[in-house]
Image: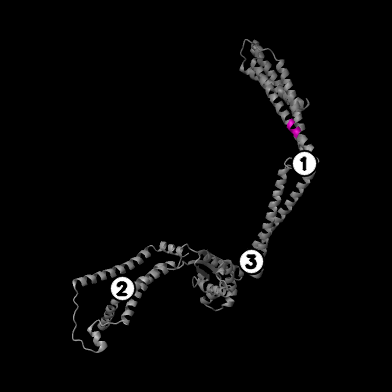
Amino acid sequence: MDQALQHVLTEARGSWRFRWVAMATAWLVGLVGIFIALTVPDRFEARAQVFVDTRDPLITASARGADAEVSVAYVRRLLLSTPNLEQVAEQTALDQRAETAEAFQRLITGLQQQIEVAQVGRGGFEANLYTIAYRDTDRDIAENVVQVLLDSFQQQSLEGDLRDDIQALSFLDQQIDDYRRRLEEAEARVADFRRRNAGLVGAEGDFFNRLASLQDEFRQVTTDLRIARETRASLAARFRGGASVDNDGDAVPGGLLELENQVLQAERQLDELRLRYTDAHPSVITAQETLDSLSTRLERRRRELGPLSSSTTSAAVLENFSIALTEAEIQVNQLAGRQRDLRQRIAELQAKVEVAPQLEAELAGLNRDNTVLREQYESLLERRELLSFDIDRKRQGRQIEFNIIEPPMAPEFAVEPNRQMLLMLALVAALGAGAGVAFILHQLRPVFITGRSIYQELGIPVLGSVSMTWTKSATSELRRVELLFTVGLLLLLGVFGVTFMSLTDISVYARNMLA
């Protein structure tokens, strides 16, 4: 043991002669290692978890009596079949990385080796859970590879008729999109036609119906205007023939004035009803009875008041007549304006009576086309709903039950490389390379370090040795050299330490510089 330790120390002392070469080698290897550790591309992992019922008859027939490893191999063979991977490469743009057919085949082989399919558990429900993972330098590609792989397998696991139903569903979707576009265009044409012919066609009815409606309204307004004018004339006559007002300003009792107003209103109402109906009409009879009752009450009230009743035709009563006459005048003006407006609209429609039927026919044709398209569109939607239900029902009974438990997801952070570990390996490699170079140079240019080594190598006995005595200047120079060597070694360790502490920022900057 002592001899082995002595031999190691002897070799170390011999290698120490080449410590500066070792230092340079360590720096060179260390810098190269740091560069490699910082510029290795990130690799992102996309992972998904699926449920595949390996107890289904199809899988059981293929792997009867097999253990879990065989089930995993079978599921892996289903997922990583060559057609599946070729479809994955085409849909995820991985095929652009291969310029030749041979390169494309190597790409497919690489996918088969790099895509990981692992069973989550060994028993129960977890025995049918599988994890699918793939790593790539592009995070989106890694996620798309797993997604397309699952979609492809899910589609291929369906039976032939179900696959036909899916194709029919896709065709229906295309037809629905086409009819939706045509229906929107037809509705736009109808809206544009209505906008261009807003005065002739409308949603409330055809041309002649609207003309007849305006004429009926015109006749009704004319009748109302005649009644309003007669009412106005009656009120004007009453106002002109009213009793003289007592200029002395005698007060009129509130109850008498109220009865006079009620009698006045009853007379106005009776006049309006007589213009509309005969005297035998129930409304006229009721109004007449009301007026008689109010008149009787008014006479009784006047007798009770005596001479004061002569003041009932006061200024307040005349003012009520004036207000009623003003209201009647306003009503006449409103009805006259409405009559003029209706007369103008009727004249405009009658002037277009020749072209209106053509426009109505054109609008009817547009509406008919719109209705046909809408019925076909709704029929397609109904057929699609039924087909989707049928596909879901068939999926419940397919031979291979395949469900996605966790959809593909790739975290924002790369899973490899482990740059901290790479830096540690680079540091170890730098120190080892420096020590190795020094040892090799010592072996190529050996010297005798001790008297024992002379005796062992040459067989010459050594009687003694003379120790070297260093001068002060030599000792100072030796210490300075050793200090420089120590500083160089500490600087190398410091570079690794700083790089390790600020690993993320430096690695991103280095990859951007290379890009």
Look at the image and give the residue range highlighted in magenta: 339-344
Whether residue 36 is visible, yes or no, is: yes
Q: Nearer the viewer, residue 245 or 490?
A: 490
Q: What residue is at 18 percent from the left and 86 percent from the top?
A: 463
* Numbered disc total: 3
Furthest residue to the bottom? 459
Residue 397 x %, y %? 62, 68
What residue is pinned by disc 1?
207
Q: Amino acid at mark 2?
A: Trp
Q: Would you call the spot at circle 3 few (<14 residues within 10 Å), some (14-19), or many (20 or more)?
A: some
What residue is pinned by disc 3?
394
Q: Amino acid at mark 1?
A: Phe
Q: Of circles 2 and 1, which is in front?
A: 2
Displayed quadrant of residue 57: bottom right
Residue 392 x %, y %? 62, 64
In the rendered image, residue 430 lying in the magenta stretch gets the answer: no
Q: Earlier in the sequence, mark 2 or mark 1?
A: 2
Where does the N terminus fall, quadrant-wise?
Answer: bottom left
What residue is pinned by disc 2?
20
Whether residue 421 is visible, yes or no, is: no
Distance of mark 2 from mark 1, alpha carbons? 108 Å
Q: Amino acid at mark 3?
A: Lys
Q: Of circles 2 and 3, which is in front?
A: 2
Residue 207 x %, y %? 77, 41
Q: Secondary structure at mark 2?
A: helix
Does residue 416 sit above or below 256 in this rendering?
below
